[in-house]
Amino acid sequence: MLVPLFRTLSKLPLPVLHVMGAALGWFVYLASPSYRKLMRTNLRAAGFGQHLSSAIAESGKSIIELAFVWCAPPDKVARLATDENWDYVQSVLDAGRGIVFLTPHLGCFEITAQQIALRTKLTVMYRPPKQAALKPLIEGARARHNLHLAPANLSGVRILAKCLKRGEPIGVLPDQVPQEGEGVWAPFFGRPAYSMTLPAKLAQMGNAEIILVYAERRPRGQGFIVRFVPFGEKLDGSAAAQASTINRAMEQLIARCPAQYFWSYNRYKQPGGVAAPDAQENP
């Protein structure tokens, strides 16, 4: 049922979808005590509690707009997205260097890979959804021209590494909670979060440039601004130090439009088999 529903919704104008999404966000917030508690806790702990009302609406928009991003004709989607600072990206590509695009769950993160793939080949790490009904919808939307998927396992890491060594760009979501053995505890908005070590390893393995990218949702359904931001930091020291550096970069991006971050995600959960952070690290 989800695929026909999304295809039907994709025919509606984006402003209409965003109105529907804002309503959905408030419905879920009021209907689910656990969702409500998690969103409020994460926002307040990060210092963005004043953005709660906007964040509730934006969270709903992020769900409903997927129908448009995944199912609408690609040229129609592209017309509603504007790139900012692509010249910087192009200069890195022209130099023959690989690029690790880091995209947090900020704004319309699903559209960023599509926009990059309009200009150059891109391989992104992909983990199949837990709901099997979503798999054909997501894979069909993500595996488009110039956009390739690498599984979130060792073979996928090898694929990404080979892409970088060929001077090709890859994409990774750096703020997902990794599995046991794939992360370290590092601060994220002042709280210990089990954080990925893969982005730093890949960048160093391929001598690649890290570029941050997010798609800010414009008001009243006017579209998206895909912003490319230089990383500007050195990844030195231990794996924990490197993860902390990347987390700080994510914090700076999120601070640009905090209401559009995915605050309902349990970023601070403790994966099975992972020891808790030291007591002195707890807030």
Image (cartoon, rainbow, N blue to C red):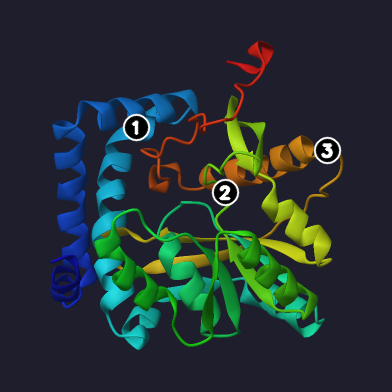
Under circle 3, the secondary element is: loop
42 relative to 173 in the view: left or right: left
Distance CA(mark 1)–CA(mark 2): 19 Å
Q: Tell which circle, 3 or 1, labels the residue nearer the N-terminal end.
A: 1
The image quadrant of residue 199 is bottom right
Image depth: mark 1 or mark 2 in front: 1
Q: How crowded is mark 1: few (under 14 residues within 10 Å), some or many (20 or more)?
A: many
Count up the numbered dots: 3
Distance CA(mark 2)–CA(mark 3): 23 Å
State the image coordinates of residue 23 (x, y, percent, origin top left): 15, 48
Asked whether disc 2 touches disc 3, contact meaning CB atoms under 8 Å apart, the reply is no
Residue shown at 35% from the left, 69% from the top: 138
**Residue labelled with disc 3:** 238
**Residue labelled with disc 2:** 253
The relative height of residue 86 versus residue 241 in the rendered view (above or below) is below
Is residue 223 shown to the viewer in this render?
yes
Residue shown at 83% from the left, 49% from the top: 234
Query: In the rendered structure, which amino acid carries the disc numbered 2?
Result: Leu
Q: Pick the residue in front: 93 or 174.
A: 174
102 relative to 54 in the view: left or right: right
Residue shown at 71% from the left, 76% from the top: 163
Q: Tell which circle, 1 or 2, labels the residue nearer the N-terminal end.
A: 1
**Residue labelled with disc 1:** 39
State the image coordinates of residue 93 (x, y, percent, origin top left): 73, 80
Q: How crowded is mark 3: few (under 14 residues within 10 Å), some or many (20 or more)?
A: few
State the image coordinates of residue 270 (x, y, percent, origin top left): 51, 29
Q: The N terminus is located in which quarter?
A: bottom left
Image depth: mark 3 or mark 1 in front: 3
